[in-house]
Amino acid sequence: MKRIAKPSERLRLGFVGGGLESGIASTHRYAAHMDGHFELVAGVFARDATRNRAAAEQYGIPPERTYSDYLSMATAEAMREDGIQVVAIMAPNAVHAPASRAFLERGIDVICDKPLATSYQEAQALLDQVRSGSALHLLTHNYSGYPLIREARDLIARGVIGTVRVVQVEHAGSFGVHALEQQGVKSFTWRADPAQAGASPVLADVGVHAHQLLRFVTGLEVSEVSAELSTLVPGRTSHDNAHVLLRLSSGARGMLWASFVAAGNRQGLQLRVFGSNGSLSWHQETPDQLLLRHQDQPHQILRRGEAWLSQAAQQATRIKAGQPEGLLEAFANIYSDAAELIKARRQQRAPDPLAQQCPTAQDGLLGMAFIEACIRSHQQQGHWTVLPA
């Protein structure tokens, strides 16, 4: 079970993004506060000055720590004795890398939304900066925070389903079924804009989540892709659907479906892994259940919160079995893992090994490699394309 941090253990946190109109801001705030590891003390919440002030007032941030841009925030907070120790970045994708650099240069740890950057080259430069400095850079691939996703990872690592042969993963939602960007819906407009989201918005928004989930659970890397990227909504000018065949590092095969246009499917995140002796199946709409199907034994439904699950699953759990946990708790697990890694760095001690499941800039680089390989494959009519080693 999770331990709630004492007030004296809290890390001083700043936000880049997270205005009152932001769809993800409340999730970040709840996740950061759930286990008591962080206290929000500063931020730049919106580009518009009025919206920026409104968010700061709502969050209880004083005017002197409400900034107009991330660079002035990074500079001022680094000079304060009580300045932020960690920044959470939840702005449009094009801001992720430059904002991360500004805080890393000043020794401030970073928790950033995915994707890491808008190009592989930009991601590589950022990872090089992380490796040459002391501050940490962590990514909120929040779906890897679900207890039964961590149980699935543990079962596969222990060989319970044998050698992985086939993986099916999809993150196919319906929030782009209509051309919301043409209607001026701000939360979707930037997501559909390659200049702000990256060359393939559907892969940058949900495809990298599916890619990271596959890697996290199976421990395998995607080595080659054959991709078809589509624009299915009339009038849209960017990709809103992706079908990708996968060749994995072990010789296993896979398929990945990422979509904005799966009508009625809501989030539509699910994962199936087939091994030589059995399979695992997980669906985010029933996140407290993991289906374990043996080839020659009775099938099992594993439930979150049970005493016989792995330590990784138990540590990611807060309440009893039978009482549902969901997205906020999974997101909070990423924040709690990040807190442990950051505190361990600052205290010059070894972190809890289970916290090292938290995604990092290395995962972000691999996500950008996946996106760009898919784009090259699509441009060559689905030709099999090798990812960088």
Image: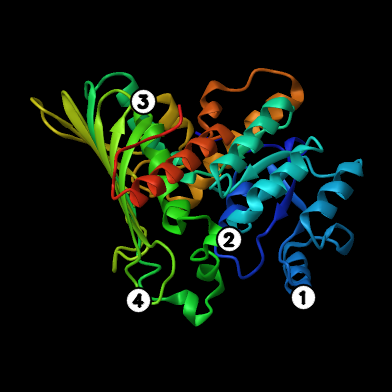
**Closest to the observer: 312 or 277?**
277
Neighbourhood count class around disc 2 (C-alpha, 10 Å): few under 14, some 14–19, many 20 upward: some
Residue 364's x, y, as percent? Answer: 53, 39
Image spot of residue 379 (x, y percent): 36, 51
Q: Give me the disc on residue 184.
A: none
Single out the mark in the foreground, 2 or 3: 2
Q: Is residue 30 left or right of residue 312?
A: right
Q: Quadrant of residue 30?
A: bottom right
Query: How far from the left and from the top, in percent, is residue 373?
Result: 41, 42
- Return the residue at label 2: 196
The three-letter amino acid code for the residue at tag 2 is: Gln
Q: Amino acid at mark 3?
A: Asp
Which secondary structure, mark 2?
A: helix
How far apart, in angstroms, are the residues tagged by discs 2 and 3?
37 Å
Disc 1 or 4, which lies upstream in sequence?
Answer: 1
The disc, 2 or 1, on the residue closer to the chain's N-terminal end is 1
User: Which residue has dot 4 on it?
Assistant: 234
Q: Decide which of tag 4 and tag 3 comes sooner along the chain.
A: 3
Does label 2 or label 3 sit earlier along the sequence? 3
Please, is residue 179 above or below residue 308 in the view? Answer: below
